[in-house]
Structures are given as structure tokens and as C-alpha cells.
Amino acid sequence: MLSRRGSGWLGVFRAMASPCEVHVDDADLATADRVVALAAEEALRIEAKFSRYRRGNIVDAINTAEGRAVVVDDETARLLDYAARLYELSDGKFDVTSGVLRRAWRFDGSDRVPSAEAIAALLPIVGWDKVRWRAPELTLPPGMEIDLGGIGKEYAVDSAAALVRPLSTRCLLNFGGDLLALGPQLGGAPWHVGIESVSVAGAAVRHIDLTVGALATSGDSRRFLLKDGKRYCHVLDPTSGWPVVGAPRSVTVAAPTCTEAGMLATLALLQGADAEAFLEAQGAQFWALR
Amino acid sequence: MQLKKRRNAKLREIGTPLAAATCALLGQAVPGSVQAQELMPWDIDTSLLIYSESDGRVQDTSLSLRARKEMREEKFLDLSLTLDSLTGASPSGAAPAGVVQTFTNPSGNAQYAIAPGEQALDPSFLDTRVAMAGNWQMPVGRLSLLSVGASLSDEYDYTHTGINANLARDFNNRNTTLSFGVALANDSIDPVGGSPVGLAPMLGLGDTSNKRGDESKDVTDFLIGLTQVINRHTIVQFNYSLSQSDGYLTDPYKVLSVVDPVTGNPVAGPAGSGLYRYLYESRPDSRDKQSVFALLKRDFNGDVFEASYRYMTDDWGVDSHTAELRYRFNFGTSRYLQPHVRFYQQTAADFYQTVLFAGAPLPAYASADHRLGEFDGITLGLKYGQATTSGNEWSARLEYYTQTGNASPGAAVGSLANLDLYPDLNALIAQFSYKFGRR
């Protein structure tokens, strides 16, 4: 689980359906081991608590409440506040209740584009504006669901970073491509990060030196539908139920926190063809691949 | 590129509230910082070019390497290196004759003979050239781009050094770009065997009494350019340029035949030399050129059409027109085919003379260099390019050039009337290029 990498250590584990890495530079084995263990525990804790695929967690309780109010804990309340704020800031394009659209859309590389009727039938159970959120009580109309998966991985990186910071700042957390450097390596050397090509898996097309802060990437070139020459990307606009048109195949954003970087990347993709213009309007540092 | 510059009013600015909300989520009192820097690769462009003139004339094999790297804050460094190997035979300027003609080569230590009726080609043409250039480009303020560069080339008898600067400024929502450029060059010429005195006769073996030492010239170029985006598909460009050359502008290896004004036959040269009479050419020591250039580039559903025209006029009496058309057929995003056609036409310099006549007073300046004569040239070419899956690109280009020209008026007297005083020139150009990135 822990191996020597140059002057530092690399720990690997799987969480949130992704390979995760923790690089620790300039540390003894015991410290490195503790850093990796803390990060892995935090990733697995967040996955267990917020995964919509797990039974018995808070998300499951909310999604199976059948119209009853659910009282949530502080951490969940903060995530729901955040989701509500993103819904406002994105004019309804970022919506944690949009996951049910996946019942119609399956982005498996096939040509199975759902019928307009199937999509229209789902729209009545999509929309944060239909939810009653008065912290700490959340009430979903029957049939509706929430999915915090769009925030979870980046949030896990930032949460894990906060836990390991007292032990070491010479480390880089990488949870499935969303990553954060707490600080540079020994001697101030930056971490060398590659952005994967959208056409050749595993090939890096951009190389970034990250000294401190986070990089998050949205977009997945391997999740799409192709019908009659038209490509349907997996980013769905919850206001219409259809994929956004003209979005880059991948957007990577740099920001102080992984959550902020990830949300900027996701909101940019939701702007479709205006993704780059949107990020420029935010003054964000980004790399888009088309 | 246009997309990047377009300001979209409907895009909300949410950076600050998003950062604040994220701090609240993560329980951070103050936002952290980010320091990320893209590590740009060297974009390397390599090419092999072969230029081959028919009938054993000039052959050039050229290898070039160009490396470009984006540095911090949109600054670019460009470096290039070119190696040329020139071989073959070059026209000496002498007219063909009905008899065998003997010439002393430029070094004065050997002679060569040209058969009756044949074009006089100096077979000792051989050179290797090394050229280097560096350029630095940086933004100045938000709307201007400054580039400065230096160039150096060296061959056996010629050394060039140059510096240049260009400032471009965007106006009108970046739809208009105005640019100003200046380039200064100082070239020194150290001809094999020395630089001949203008209009002095070619001498026999070993006699270099009319050759002098090395020479030099200075060239100053000014350019004003305007680029205008017409719409999303069309862009036009206009340039005006002025080029002033001062110094030694003569080709030290070119001569003119002196012929009998009635028979057209060569006349005897210096006593005891065994040569006919050939005078080294002489050109004015300054030349001012002005040119205007217009380019239209248009996108047709992903294909690119490009048309350009250039008019050049100078105070030597040379006027030229160049028209070029290119059409790039893009097949998907990774392959393209680009046909190219170029038409060129020029008038002769005032002092261009195919031959000099014996007994006539010598003009101040005279040259029989075909490049200063009246001629038309046509280039037809085809280029194919393909991107590899790893993002590199190779391309191959094949072009054919054909040139036909005319002797100076009144030159075809007597025996010269039956000889080809301006032989056609045909050349093939083949180029293979490979572009790749390297960190």
C-alpha cells in the first residue's frame, strides 16, 4: 500500500469507484503511513456516508423518505446548503436532484438515445425548487432523489487535506484525478501533474506544475452516446433533461480548494459551447480540451 | 481564437460567491491559495527540403529545425537552425556562342570550357550554408505584442547578421491589428578570388590583378501591416513594405559577354589570356524596393481558401506581380490536402543586358543575370498533411516550378539570333516535415 517514490512515499487505495493516490515527500515511514491512512479513512468515510449506492446512509434515508421530512446532521446540512447555493448561482443548471434523469440516459457509447416522452416523464421529479430545505430538515416530494456524487469526490479531497495538514504539508492528494497539493515538495519543488488526453487513454497532453492548491477535471470522453453522427455528452441540463451541446470534452480548473475547482469545471461544462468564456468571466485558470 | 475574445454578457460572474460558499462548506476562515503553472513543451518542426533545377543546375538540400516554446505569461521563444548544401552549376551570365568558350573560374586558378550553343554554366558552384535565428515575443499591456529577433548565417563567401523588431497592436475589439516592423541587416561578402572591379574584363589563369578584397552591404526594411477580421469566416491582411539596400549589391561571379554588334560573335579578350572578352557585371550601390501585399483567408465549412497578391517596384526598374492561391481540404481533423498555385511576373532592371556590344561606350551599370531580366514563373504544388494519434503531424509537399524569360531588346544580333539567350528553367521542390512536442 505504501511504496518509496524518490525522496518521498506513495500510498494507493480505491475509494469512490476511483484509484486514489497520496504522495508524501520528506517524511519518515511512520508519518507517511499515518498520512495515507488518514486520507484513505476519510475518503472511505465520505463514500460510505454519501454514496447513493449504499443502503442505510443519510442519502438513502432522504431518498426513501416518501415525502417525509428527514433531519440531517451538520455535515450533511453544510453540503445541502452548498448544493442550494450552487443551484442559485447556476440558474438551476447544477441540481443535486437531477440524478433520476439517468433512468432514461445511459451513456454507454451506444446509440440508445431516449425518447422525448421518457425524458419529459422524469422532469416533474427533477428540480431543487421543488424541495423543502429548512436546516436541519429536508423534505423531498415523493419520487424525488438527491445525489451528492457531483460534489463528493472533490469534497473528500479537501476534507482529507484538512486532516493531514497537521502531519505534513509536503503532500499531494489525488482522488481519481481531482487533486490538491498542500504545499510543494522538499526544496519548494512543484508537483508534476499531467492532464489526460481525451482521445488516447493514459496519454498526458498537458503538463502542469502545481506548487499549492487544487486541480479538478470534469468531462469524460468515454461516457457518451452516438446516434446519426451526433454526439450526446454525459452532461445533462436538468432544466431540459437533455445533454448540453457544444461542451469541451474535458475541463480542468485550478483553484485554492478542490471543491471550488471541481464546481467551476462542472458549471463550465453546463455552459456548453460557452464553457471557456464562462471560465474567463470568472477569472479562472483553466485548460479545456475539445 | 475569436471565441476566446468574445465577451458574453449573459455569463454570470460567480467566482466570489462560489469561493465564499466553498469556504463555508469546508469550515475555512480564509481561502487558501493556488499556484499552478502549465509546463509548455517545445514545439519542434523539422524538415528536409530538396530543390532541384533541371539540366544539372543548382541543387539545394536543406535541413531545418525550428523549436518554439511558450514561456510564462504568454511569452514565446523561437529558435531555428537551417543547414543548406548547394551543388551544381550556376549560369555565369555569359551568352552562348557558336564556338567553344573558355572561362577562368572565380578563384583564377582553373578554367572550364563551354561547348558551342550551350548555356554558360559555371560548374564550380558549391557551398554550405548555416543559418540561425532567434525570436522573443511578449505581450505589452493587454493589447500589444512585441517581438524582437536576431539572425545569423554563414557560408564560405558570405556572412549575414541581422536584427529585427515588430510591434502589433489590437484595436476594435481585437478585430483589427496594426503592426509595425523594422529589420536591419549587415552582410559581408568575401568572394572566392576577390571581388572583381565592375565592368573589368575576365583575365587569364592566375591573374587576379582586377580583383579586390571583401565588400559589405546594409539592408533596412520597414513594414506596416493591417489585419482585419471581417467575420467569423474571413480575414484580410494588407502590408506595405520598404526595403533599402546600400553597399555592394553586385554578384561577383556574374559576367557579360562582349559581342560584335553585327555578327553577334564573341570578340577577343585581354591579350595573352586566350579568352574572349567577358566583363564582370556592375550594379548600382543602392536599391530601394517598395511592395504592397494583400491576403484574403476564408473558411468554407472547415476548408480554408487563401488568396494573396503582391506588387513590388524598385528604383532599378524591376516591377513584379505575384499571385498565389491555396485551398486546404480538411478531411476530418487529422488529414488535409492543399493544392497551391503561384504566378510570378517581373520586368527587367534598367541595366539588364543580355550582351554588351564591342565598340559601344560602356554603360555605368550592366548585368546579364537572368534574375534581373524579364521573366514569368509558375509554381504548381500539392501538400498533404496528417496528424498522428499522439498529436504529432507530418506533411509532404511536392512543387514544380517553370520559368520562361526574354533576352534584353536588340540582343539577338547575327549568330545570337539562332541561340537560346534566356533558357527556360524548371525545378522540382520536395519537402518532408515532421512536427512534434518535446518536454
Image (tube, helix red, strand yellow):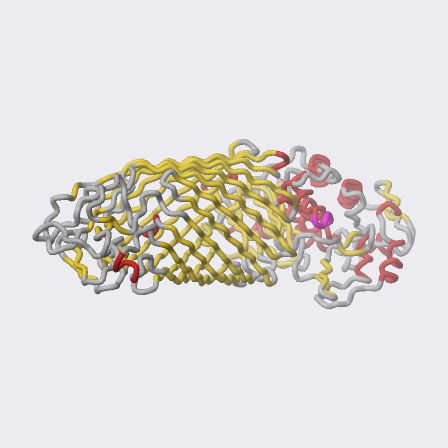
Nearer the observer, B56 or B79: B56
Residue B164 visible? The answer is no
- Camera-nearest residue between B362 and B315: B362
Give the image location of residue B203, x and y in percent.
13, 50
- Residue at image location 47% in from the left, 60% down from the top: B380
Q: Main secondary structure of the magenta part?
A: helix
Q: Give the quarter of the figure containing the N terminus of chain B.
A: top right
Instruction: Report x, y in % for residue B305.
Output: 58, 54
Indicate the position of residue A29 as horizontal and vertical percent values.
50, 51
Q: Nearer the viewer, residue B400 or B420?
A: B420
Is B121 above or below relative to B347?
below
| In the image: residue B403, left or right of residue A178 | left
Residue B145: % across, % down = 51, 36
Q: Is residue B340 visible?
A: yes
Residue drawn 46% across the image and 46% down it: B69
Q: Is residue A282 left or right of residue B154?
A: right
Residue at the spot x=21%, y=62% of the render? B114
The residue segment tinted magenta is A269-273
Quick one: which residue is furthest to the left in this view? B272
